[in-house]
Image (cartoon, grey):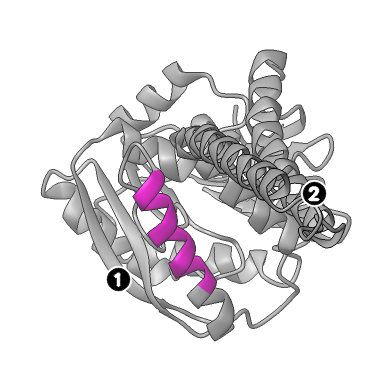
Amino acid sequence: MMPCYNEAENVEQAYREVRRIFENLPQYDYEHIFIDNASTDQTVDILKRLAAEDRRLKIIVNTRNFGHIRSPYHGILQAGGAAVICLASDLQEPPSLIPEFLKWWEQGFKMVRGVKSQSEESALMFAIRKMYYNFINRVSDIKLLKNSTGFGLYDRCVIEELRKIDDPYPYFRGLVSDIGFPSHEIEYTQPTRKRGISKNNFYTLYDIAMLGITNHSKVPLRLATMLGFAMAIASFLIAMGYLVAKLVFWDQFSLGTAPLIIGLFFLGSVQLFFIGIIGEYIGAIYTQVQKRPLVVEKERINFD
C-alpha cells in the first residue's frame, strides 16, 4: 500500500520496482494499492494508465486532500490478503526490503518494521527526530519504536485489531506499538528524495509529534498541575518575604516595579504554554467525538 499526493515523477517507478520484486517471488500473490489524496498533477492519470495494463494495481482517489494521517490509514484498512506492506511512494522507503520483510513474517513475526539507522536527508532533521523519540519514550505509556515511520509489514491479525479501534485521527505508529504483537525490526539507510518535492513541512511534522504525545501520554497535563502547584507555593513564599521585608524596613525597602513586571511576564508565559498543551488535548478529544470518516472516496479502480 502506497499513499501518494502529487507524486507524478515517482509513482510509475515505485510501481515498477514493486512489480519487479514480486516477479522474483512467484510464491506470493499480491495487490498493489495506491491511495491518492486528490493530487493536482498527473499522478492519477499515470496510475490509471498503469492500472489498465495490470489488474493487480488498485487505485483509491479521495475527493479532497484528507491529510497525511487519515489517508494512509484508510488505505491500510482497504487492503486484503494475509499481510499488508506499507511504504512511501517517493521511494525514500526502499522496496528492496520487501523480501526481507516477508522472510521474517514467514518466521512468525506479526509485524516487521523498517527503522532508519541513518538518513541521507538533513542531519539536523534526523537529530530532531531522534530527540523527539527519546522524549516521547520517556513520557509515553507505551514504548514507541524510534525512527520508524510505519514502513513495514503487518499481518492480517494486526489490521483486524486496528479495525476495532475505530479512530478518526489515528497515530498509526503508536497504535501498532500499543497492540503489542511480536515485532522484528530491520535497519536501513533512508535515501534522499531523487524527484519531486517533499510534502512534509513544519506543520505536518508538528501535527504528527503532538498526535503521538496526546494519544499516548498524560505527563504534560500532570506536569502542568504539579508545576502550577509549585509556582503557587513559590509565589506565596515570595509575597510573604516581600511583606515581611516591607514591614520591618518600611522606609528603606522599596518594592519597585521591575520584579512585578518580570514576575507577571514569567507567570503569563508559563500559563500560555500550558493553556496550549491543554488545548492540544481538547483538540484531540474534539476530533474523536466528531466521528468523521477517515476519507471520502471519489472513485476506486480495479477493486471489482
What residue is disc 2 on?
Answer: 264
> Looking at this view, is 16 or 64 the one in front?
64
Span highlighted in magenta in the image: 128-139
- Dot 1 or dot 2: first in sequence order is 1
Mark 1 touching mark 2, by CB under 8 A? no
Q: Residue furthest left?
A: 107
Helix, strand or loop: magenta stretch = helix
Tell me if residue 299 comes above or below residue 194 in the rendering. Answer: above
Give the secondary structure at mark 2. Answer: helix
State the residue at coordinates (88%, 55%): 40
Q: Nearer the viewer, mark 1 or mark 2?
A: 2
Q: Amino acid at mark 2?
A: Leu
User: x%, y% of residue 101?
Assistant: 27, 58
User: x%, y% of residue 187?
Assistant: 30, 71
User: x%, y% of residue 256?
Assistant: 85, 58
Is residue 5 in view?
no
Tell me if residue 157 comes above or below residue 54 in the rendering. Answer: above
Q: Is residue 275 left or right of residue 76?
A: right
User: x%, y% of residue 13?
Assistant: 60, 71
Q: Which mark is residue 187?
A: 1
Q: Which mark is residue 102?
A: none
